Image (spheres, rainbow, N blue to C red):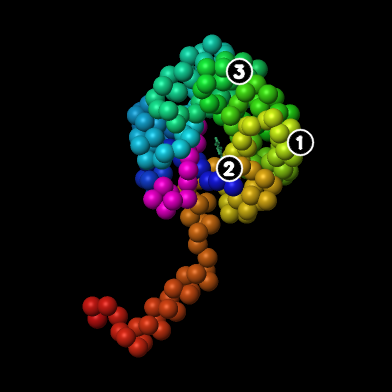
Amino acid sequence: MKFFIDSANLDEIRSAAEMGIVCGVTTNPSLIAKEGRDYVQTLKEICEIVDGPISGEVSPFSTTAEEMVKEGREIAAMHPNMVVKIPMTAEGLKAIRVLNSKGIKTNCTLIFSANQALLAARAGASYVSPFLGRLDDISQPGIDLIQTISQIFTNYPEIHCEIIAASVRNPIHITDCALAGADIATVPYKALVQCLRHPLTEEGLRKFENDYAAVFGRPNA
Ligand code: E4P
């Protein structure tokens, strides 16, 4: 399973990229609004930091296929790595079909059922984004959805659509997504940092330091 970072914050994206753990970025209107910066400029700056697929979502006010296709073409023109994020609606599927026919990659978002994922893949989406955490929030095990989509896509090898597990909230989600067969997990910076830490690693570092210092002293002491 590969990692994308789910963020529009340049400092977070730069830090995760420097650690070498992310190979793509996903954004959405809420994440862009949280930063309060210009949409196009933010996406262009993200493309300078991470050399991989960068999802930029169409405006929440673009509701017809025509509007989404027009905006999708503008997003795709920003940089060769841009992926157009399109919501799972009938108009969204129409837009995905048109954009795919023009060689533009799409990420179908707000997926909450296996059938929605299958429809998006058949319409020509390059990625589907099932939302794990938001299902958990309403007491439906989100991980079951990731597992089911993964099984269905495996049953039909002609489907090349990748599964981006989205709405990932914690380290347990990440392990579960990898076990369930997600191709990618898009993870907020906080959860990435939670994954790299372990109390025994911290304790081990302190012990090495103290044992070494007891014999050789501390640098510049
Ligand atoms: C990413 O593609 C999604 O928009 C994002 O993961 C949603 O996460 P949330 O449910 O925590 O808002």
Residue 159 % position (x, y): 68, 30
Name the residue nearer the viewer: 89 or 215.
215
Q: Which residue is mark 2?
A: 184
Q: Which residue is mark 3?
A: 97
**Residue shown at 45%/23% (left/top)?**
76
In the rendered structure, does residue 176 fall within the stretch colored magenta? no
Q: Say few, some or many: other residues with alpha carbon within 10 Å of mark 1 (under 14 / 14 to 19 / 20 or more).
A: few
Please, what is the three-letter code of the amino acid marked with disc 3?
A: Arg
The extreme top residue here reads 66
In the rendered structure, does residue 18 fall within the stretch colored magenta? yes
The extreme bottom residue here reads 215
The yes-or-no answer for disc 2 within 8 Å of ligand 1 is no
Q: Between disc 2 and disc 3, whose residue precedes?
A: 3
The extreme front residue here reads 158
Please, what is the three-letter code of the amino acid marked with disc 1?
A: Asn
Q: Which residue is mark 1?
A: 155
Kindly indicate whether the residue at mark 1 contacts the one at mark 3 (C-beta within 8 angstroms): no
What label sits on residue 36 in the rendered view? Answer: none
The extreme left residue here reads 220
Q: Give the number of the mark in front: 3 or 1.
A: 1
Residue 141 % position (x, y): 72, 44
Q: Secondary structure at mark 3?
A: helix
Q: Quadrant of residue 50?
A: top left
**Span shown in magenta:** 16-28
